[in-house]
Amino acid sequence: QVQLVESGGGLVQPGGSLRLSCAASGSISSIYSMGWYRQAPGKQRELVAVIVTGGHTNYGDSVKGRFAISRDNAKNTVYLQMNSLKPEDTAVYYCNVFVEYVGPSWGQGTQVTVSS
């Protein structure tokens, strides 16, 4: 089993910044990808950003140029730096990790609210 612990959510004003962290533990001998998804009320869960082994990244169109994903392999931790936040970024953010021979795992979610 894979355990994911997320942190860093909260309330921020428009234009502000937040950094999310997600630490993986357990059966993680070979992590292929680590990433973030989000789900706003009444909407489907969508990709925010993902980083795969080797460093290739992929971002959702709505966050390109504002968010940056990074990964610390020694700590099995993925980070999401979110800048220039907008009210439409308000959502529950979920960490996702894909481990070879294990499959995908999800974190419990952390709330991000962008409001003045």
Image (cartoon, rainbow, N blue to C red):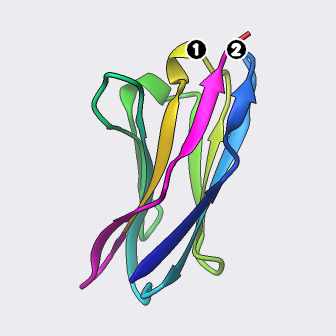
Name the spot of residue 50 as percent of width and height, x first.
Answer: 42, 52
Q: Which residue is mark 1?
A: 87
Tell me if residue 10 is in the magenta stretch.
Answer: no
Give the vertical position of 15 relative to 17 (above or below): above
- Residue 87, quarter of the rendered image: top right
Which three-letter amino acid code belongs to the residue tagged 1?
Pro
Q: Sequence order check: which comes first, mark 2 or mark 1?
A: 2
Which three-letter amino acid code belongs to the residue tagged 2?
Pro
The answer to whether mark 2 and mark 1 are in CB contact below 8 A is: yes
Q: Residue at left 70%, top 14%? A: 14
Q: Residue at left 32%, top 22%? A: 42
Helix, strand or loop status at disc 1: helix
* Label 1 CA crowd tier, 10 Å (few <14, some 14–19, many 20+): some
Q: Residue at left 75%, top 23%? A: 16
Helix, strand or loop status at disc 2: loop
Viewed as shown, does residue 35 lie left or right of 112?
Answer: left
Give the vertical position of 26 relative to 77 (above or below): below
Image quarter in which the N terminus is found: bottom left
Name the spot of residue 74 as percent of width and height, x first.
Answer: 64, 81
89, 59: nearer the viewer? 89
Give the vertical position of 98 relative to 2 (above or below): above
Tell me if residue 105 is in the magenta stretch.
Answer: yes
User: Taken as a whole, is the magenta stretch helix, strand or loop?
Assistant: strand
Give me the C-alpha separation between circle 2 and circle 1. Answer: 6 Å
Name the spot of residue 83 as percent of width and height, x first.
Answer: 68, 29
* Label 2 CA crowd tier, 10 Å (few <14, some 14–19, many 20+): some
12, 69: nearer the viewer? 12
99, 1: nearer the viewer? 1
Viewed as shown, does residue 2 lie left or right of 115?
Answer: left
Q: Which residue is mark 2?
A: 14
Segment tinted magenta in the rendering: 98-115
